[in-house]
Amino acid sequence: MILFVVFVTTVGYIIGQATGYGWSFTFFAILLSLCSSIGSYYFSDQIVLATSGAKRITKKDNPELYRIVENLAIGDGVPTPKVYIINDPSPNAFATGRDPKHASVAVTSGILDRLNKTELEGVLAHELSHVKNFDTRLMAITAVLVGFVAILANMFMNSFFWGGFGMRGRRDEEGNQAQIIFLVLGLVFAIIAPLIATLIQLAISRKREFLADASGALLTRYPEGLASALEKISSDPRPLRTASNATAHLFIVNPFKGKGFSGWLAGLFSTHPPIEERIKILRSM
């Protein structure tokens, strides 16, 4: 996260110098990015649940599921989150909410059909660990930083190609080598910075999955339950119909099954670490 902030600040400084507006350009972009993210910070959980087609349940609707969530929350020392079910045959689950007091856990009907009680406990412990570890808040912060980089890049490219804004004083200072260097660097960073920022965001997401696996295993004291659940979920070929690129990182397993490509490059752009590696670590505990 520190390196991420340093990277974002560097991009802002270079583009600000290239446009001739210095730090004022950067501060304006920060303000714009923060304003756009405030709404998503407070309402993103409801947006995600609505777009996923999740329906809230009470204890009488599914006593076993609700009781598992309730018992795990008590054991983990967090408030019992709201419980939702998504009517989809693809087995998957996710947690959302900005903090434990405003958390929700959603599971698909497919995961309820495929997993036994021990495996379901492992999955729900993983999701509650995301809540307790404030992973949803962390990913919101990284999303703000990625959005900030995208805003900077778009503002610079628009000012460069259309003139006017951002190219202040450039025409009568063409001999200034430093400004020319910043202009070239600004172009390079405007092109590659959004990609780099997204890769950092995905890397953070993968690390938090490992942490949630470990925390979930610690909560249940039975790593095999989650390991077995991951095997069953990943072996199901059906993608989740309601998932999108914006919500894929929330799920316990990548919901776009069979839609990606393999190899090192795919690993960089993956929202989740390899299932085989997660299972191996769990079974070594």
Image (spheres, rainbow, N blue to C red):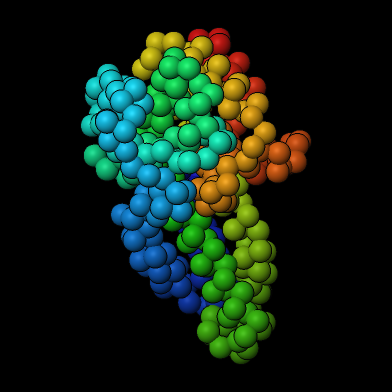
Q: Is residue 192 above or below residue 173?
A: above
* Residue 2: x %, y % from top left: 45, 43
Task: Say which residue appears at 24% left-offset and 22% top-offset.
Answer: 74
State the residue in front, 111 or 43: 111
Task: Say which residue appears at 41% left-offset and 38% top-offset.
Answer: 85
Q: Is residue 214 left or right of residue 56?
A: right
* Residue 158: x %, y % from top left: 59, 78
* Residue 19: x %, y % from top left: 55, 76
State the residue in front, 103 or 145: 103
Q: Is residue 116 left or right of residue 134?
A: right
State the residue in front, 7 or 97: 97
Q: Is residue 225 above or below residue 10?
A: above
* Residue 234: x %, y % from top left: 62, 28
Task: Say which residue appears at 47% left-offset and 27% top-offset.
Answer: 112
Q: Is residue 112 left or right of residue 171?
A: left
Quadrant in the picture for residue 239: top right
Q: Is residue 273 above or below residue 3?
A: above
State the residue in front, 92 or 88: 88
- Is there any visible trace of residue 40 in the rendered image? yes
